Structure formats: C-alpha cells, structure tokens
Amino acid sequence: MFEQENKQIQFSNENSPFTELFSLLKRYENLSSGLPTLAYNSDELKVMYQHIDNAMDALLQGLQDIGHLMNMIARDKKEVTDDINNIGFFITSISNLTEALNSLRSDADCVLRDRGVSNY
C-alpha cells in the first residue's frame, strides 16, 4: 500500500508484482460492440508476441540453469543456505514474470486472431 495525495491505494496482486505491473500497463479500447480489446495496432501486437516468446525462452533457460547449479551445489554439500533462499525468491519472481508475460501473449494472440492476422 502507498499514499498518493492523501489517498491510500491497495495493490491487487501484492505478491505478484509483475502481474500487477502488466495489468496496469495494458492499454484497452472498446470495440463497436462495446467489448474491450487491446488498443494496439496489429504490427505492435506481432512485435510484442515475438518479444514475449523470446523473453520466456530466456527466462525458462535461466531457470533450468539455476536448477542445474543448485543440484551441483547440493551434490558438493556446500553450506549456502542464505544463497539458496535468495535463489528461491528469485525463482518466485521469475515465475511471476513468466506468468505475466504469458498472460500478455495470450491477450495479444486473441486480438490478432480476432483481427484475422496470421503469421506472427
């Protein structure tokens, strides 16, 4: 929670900061039917979709590498309890970022399909 002009604002996803951030950053507009849709042109959505795929690949590869490193540390029985706790927090954050990226990619995919756009 934080104060802004004597008004308190409550976070919806306090434990999922990337989900919260991405939900605030999405731009919407209403279709003629009154339904909301993402307010980006199709080229912007294609670029977002491709960057999200690349980012998720990098994040998942990094998580796999961290898992491999943790396995090597456990095998060598080194005392690194604090470091492991920090890595756990990092993995939680990366998992939330991956979830937020996937949600944004799904929204972009839905809008592109609704617009009849292919090859993205």
Image: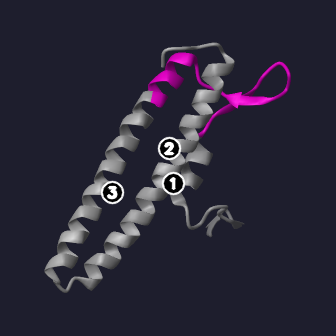
Establish if 72 lies above or below 105: below
How many other residues sit within 10 Å of disc 3, few (<14), some (14-19) or many (≥20)? some
Q: Amino acid at mark 1?
A: Phe
Numbered label tally? 3
At 32% from the left and 44% from the top, the residue drawn is: 58
What residue is shown with label 1?
Answer: 18
Q: Amino acid at mark 2?
A: Leu
Q: Kindly check if marks 1 and 3 are in contact, taking CB atoms under 8 A apart as contact.
A: no
Residue 43 on the magenta span? yes
Q: Amino acid at mark 3?
A: Leu
Establish if 7 lies above or below 120: below
Q: Is residue 11 found left or right of 105 in the rendered image?
A: right
Q: Earlier in the sequence, mark 3 or mark 2?
A: 3
What residue is shown with label 2?
Answer: 101
Residue 104 on the magenta span? no
Span shown in magenta = 26-49
To which quarter of the image does residue 32 belong? top right
Q: Nearer the viewer, mark 3 or mark 2?
A: 3
How many other residues sit within 10 Å of disc 1, few (<14), some (14-19) or many (≥20)? many
